[in-house]
């Protein structure tokens, strides 16, 4: 008898019919002999509706009260799912974050989980109940309702799985697993049976938005076995996210290809090549609340260097303004921009032990005449910035070059 | 500095604009030097939406889980009202029923309040906060969310006023007070400045649906000063509901006239005049979940009697079926029905000390040629059943005969 935590997102519980489907799936898991804890999100659209309502009554909704309002979304879902379970003869009990004592800090709208009291959950499971817990929420030490921020339901599921030492935490979503890349671009893209936490983190942060990145970190830290599955298909094992690397000979060097179209490049030309220049350039950018992605500083010559970084395209104009205001102080010669960039990344723990991965990537792109404008690397990832028009071509040729369609 | 509990119903908080209006009204009360506790209902329509959703997922929603779902309605309102208060510079803190420890029994969907922990409310008030509490809900001793049933927000307000010994409990609604009768029928109908709890109970149960009857009982029991006011008008003192009778000479004999169109009469003819016959007739009616209103049993002759009672018109067919099935066992000769009945009641504590009120009522109706079909009386109320077509006429002539327009 395994202890399973299942998490269903907003789309999976988006209407009455879908909630009944989830109930049937949960009932089947229990019938298979497993003890089941279910974590649910708000019905799709509900959180946005509540936030819109808050903005109608207050220009800057007070965070404590915003959490009171927004947390009702998940509370509705837990009640509805338990009713649906009762209706098909399955004993079930719902818990809000406060009722199951998911203790968080007091950072309203982006709280962090500190502790979970597993005793009431264990008792209910032992009495044959399915336990249904509201995702995304908790209470602080003073009993104030808190929320974990967007995607927090994944984190709730992983935290409960960690607290109860569950055998597996299953994240049901609208995709049936993690793919080597986007199947809309590469039809041969293959679902991965397993992927490591580190790879998943790199893929998630690069735009494969299957799982909330915080929950993956959490799962890795507490060694929770995490599995991504489709809530709309009955078949399939999804993708298991594991701590262990798979050390068989057949292991592919890279696991997946991520990409991001939404990149704009800024280059500050001819800045003095002295310590602190990166700080001087990027501090005002951060102060303006602009997220910076890739950062490149090349060796200087004649006492000057060029400094490039990328931001989201929507932030480009703002970033330029900040740089222009700062240009004289920096002693920069000019500022250049390019908002037709895209980023392609290959990710794989295998590249640690396989030299030559980077050169294979660069050669593959060169053979297609694709010019690489920027390169950044990490232990298990190589990212290149290229012109957006070459993006699909680049992903397809890299997918083939690294044999990802073969598994 | 007075301590005031204000309760706003679903219509008063029905949209963002109305919630902001309530915030301004609350702010004004605080500015006047009062400490203010606000109890709110769900936004109008919200409770029905949630119940409909529950019925979509389950044919018979489990009561514990129904309470989890339905209680979110008030939770949304408390958060929104506090935001709106913050937005105009008023410190405010929201509490769900569970957070303010409104302890109830475990009768889900119709729980009764057992206790309220006033300490956190007092502390927040002392710190200069407006305290906003979700009406209609609490938690039982095991921490399960409960609801008090429809109209329960009035009860929450009165219970909080009783627990904190508030100076006044103000019920804001869409009428500006309690009237001598329905102004749509008698344009001269006059708003009462004061009314006793007993009168209010009789008027409320007879169809003047201003206040939830349970909250009036509660207020009477704990001697809470209750005032009904309009949330849409800035002027006016509303109607104060008091424990004390007003013993001035000018006091009118009766305070108001209530009426109900929705009456159907059943008469069981020629039943044996023996002990237990009322029980034999009404027990199966009660078992069929039919509410009985007026009950008349006249003296028998020749060992037989006629037994009449009234039910809601919607229940008439069901009641007839029950009686027909029971007819032979009762030894009844026949069953007659009339679904064109209406009931008119005059209510007033003054009638206790004024003999002749009943005969004045009967004479007034007789002078207009209105036949009285049934009569029931209590200490402070006389009700008559008449043909519905005479209802408006009866209310008008009685209103004039008892001088209600003069105040």
Image (cartoon, coloured by chain):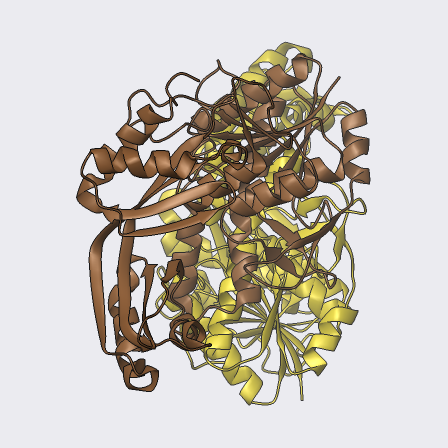
Chain colours: A yellow, B brown
- For the point 38% across and 21% down, the residue is B403
Q: Relative to residue A22, is residue A377 depicted above or below?
A: above
**Residue depicted at 42% across the width and 29% down the height:** B174
- Which residue is at the front of the view, A276 or A325? A325
Between B386 and B275, the one lying in front of the other is B275
Instruction: Give coordinates of residue B218: x percent, y percent.
Output: 63, 44
Question: Does the image show residue A286?
Answer: yes
Check the picture and name the quadrant holding the N terminus of chain A. Answer: bottom right
Residue A338 % position (x, y): 45, 31
Q: Is residue B48 left or right of residue B267?
A: right
Residue A46, x across and y down, in percent: 46, 48
Residue A185, by quadrant, is: bottom left
Q: Residue furthest front?
A: B302
Give how far across and how far down residue B81 sits, in percent.
57, 31
Q: Is residue A45 visible?
A: no
At 27% from the left edge and 64% from the top edge, which residue is drawn? B266
To which quarter of the image does residue A161 belong? bottom right
Q: How many marks?
A: 0
Nearer to me, A352 or A90: A90
Q: Residue reaching furthest top?
A: A328
């Amino acid at each position: 008898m395994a202890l399973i935590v299942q998490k269903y997102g907003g789309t999976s519980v988006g209407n009455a019919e879908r909630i009944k489907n989830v109930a049937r799936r949960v009932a089947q898991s229990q019938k298979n002999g497993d003890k089941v804890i279910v974590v649910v999100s708000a019905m799709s659209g509900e959180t946005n509706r509540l936030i819109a309502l808050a903005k109608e009554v207050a220009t800057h909704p007070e965070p404590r009260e915003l959490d009171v309002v927004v947390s009702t979304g998940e509370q509705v879902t837990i009640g509805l799912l338990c009713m649906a379970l009762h209706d098909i003869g399955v004993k079930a009990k719902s818990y809000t974050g406060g009722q199951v004592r998911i203790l968080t800090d007091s950072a309203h709208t982006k709280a962090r989980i500190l502790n979970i009291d597993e005793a009431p959950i264990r008792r209910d499971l032992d009495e044959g109940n399915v336990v249904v817990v509201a995702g995304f929420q908790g209470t602080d030490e003073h009993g104030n309702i808190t929320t974990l921020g967007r995607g927090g339901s994944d984190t709730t599921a992983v935290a409960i799985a960690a607290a109860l030492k569950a055998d597996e935490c299953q994240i049901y979503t609208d995709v049936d697993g993690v793919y080597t890349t986007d199947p809309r671009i590469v039809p041969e893209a293959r679902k991965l049976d397993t992927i490591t936490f580190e790879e998943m983190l790199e893929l998630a942060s690069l735009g494969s938005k299957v799982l909330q990145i915080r929950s993956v970190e959490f799962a890795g830290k507490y060694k929770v076995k995490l599995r991504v599955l489709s809530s709309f298909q009955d078949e399939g094992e999804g993708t298991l996210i594991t701590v262990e690397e798979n050390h068989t000979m057949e292991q592919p060097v890279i696991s997946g290809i991520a990409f991001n179209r939404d990149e704009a490049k800024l280059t500050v030309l001819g800045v003095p090549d002295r310590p602190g220049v990166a700080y001087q350039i990027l501090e005002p950018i951060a102060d303006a609340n602009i997220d910076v992605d890739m950062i490149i500083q090349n060796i200087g010559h004649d006492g000057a260097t060029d400094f490039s970084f990328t931001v989201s395209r929507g932030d480009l104009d703002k970033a330029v303004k900040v740089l222009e205001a700062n240009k004289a102080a920096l002693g920069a010669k000019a500022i250049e921009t390019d908002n037709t960039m895209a980023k392609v990344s290959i990710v794989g723990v295998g590249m640690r032990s396989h030299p030559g991965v980077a050169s294979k990537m660069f050669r593959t792109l060169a053979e297609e005449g694709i010019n690489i404008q920027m390169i950044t690397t990490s232990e298990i990832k190589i990212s290149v910035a290229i012109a957006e028009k070459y993006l699909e071509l680049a992903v397809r040729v890299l997918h083939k070059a690294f044999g990802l369609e073969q598994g």
